[in-house]
Image: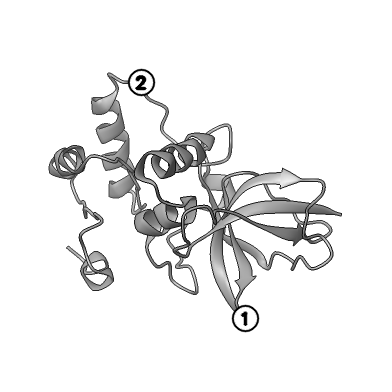
Amino acid sequence: MSFVRVIPLIRTPLGVDVFDYRVPDGMEIEPGDLLVVPFRRQPVPALAIERVATSLVADRALDVIGPYAGIRFPHAFLRLISWTAQRTFCSQAAVLKAWLRTLPKKPGDNTPTPSERTADNGSMLSRWTIDGRKELIARANELLRGGKRVLIVTPWRTRADAFAHDLESAHVLHGDMSDGEAFISP
């Protein structure tokens, strides 16, 4: 029996960051996978941050329901959540909720399938250096023209606005927006 430590897509107070869930036999879960877990009698998306062999709540841990749309975030995303939480005095769950907001209960058909993943860790990640901004924009525009969705996360609003200016089609989300504003199509 193994367990996975997750950050649920809900706001939690500082210090309440992760929850342990039992991994059903045969289910493959890696850090960065977006999952669905039972939380307060309802299914909730959650981000897997690590697999563990034991848990302090092993006797009452619930089973993971399954993956959410086959989405896997890179390890750098997990580190960025932790770094941001430490510097903003928020829980990791509050940071994740601020970035991802409310996900649909049923994921759409526009999510990458495992055969479309390109990076070595399974995510559709464009590897780029600090000077690779043009590469990033070119790759993002290529994916957008192909009908794909692209997520670029940055903690700086001015950088987000600059990326949006250079992309052929972009929607900028920031923490000052209401959920309704965030999901209005541009």
Rendering quarter of residue 70: bottom right
Q: Residue 81's spot in the image, x, y percent?
A: 45, 43
Q: Residue 109's spot in the image, x, y percent?
A: 46, 65
Residue visible at 20% across and 51% down in the picture: 169
Residue visible at 76% across and 65% down in the picture: 61
Q: Which residue is mark 1?
A: 41
Residue visible at 51% across and 37% down in the picture: 118
The tag earlier along the polypeptide, 1 or 2, is 1
Rendering quarter of residue 87: top left
Residue lying farthest right? 1
* Quadrant holding the C terminus: bottom left
Residue visible at 72% across and 45% down in the picture: 51
Front position among marks 1 and 2: 1
Q: Which residue is mark 2?
A: 129
Give the amino acid at mark 1: Arg
Q: For numbered disc 2, what is the local secondary structure?
A: loop
Q: Residue 122's spot in the image, x, y percent?
A: 57, 40
Residue lying farthest bottom? 41
CA gap, disc 1 and disc 2: 43 Å
* Quadrant holding the N terminus: bottom right
Please say if 31 is above or below 137. Answer: below
Disc number placed over residue 55 in the picture, else none = none
Please say if 25 is above or below 42. Answer: above
Q: For numbered disc 1, what is the local secondary structure?
A: loop
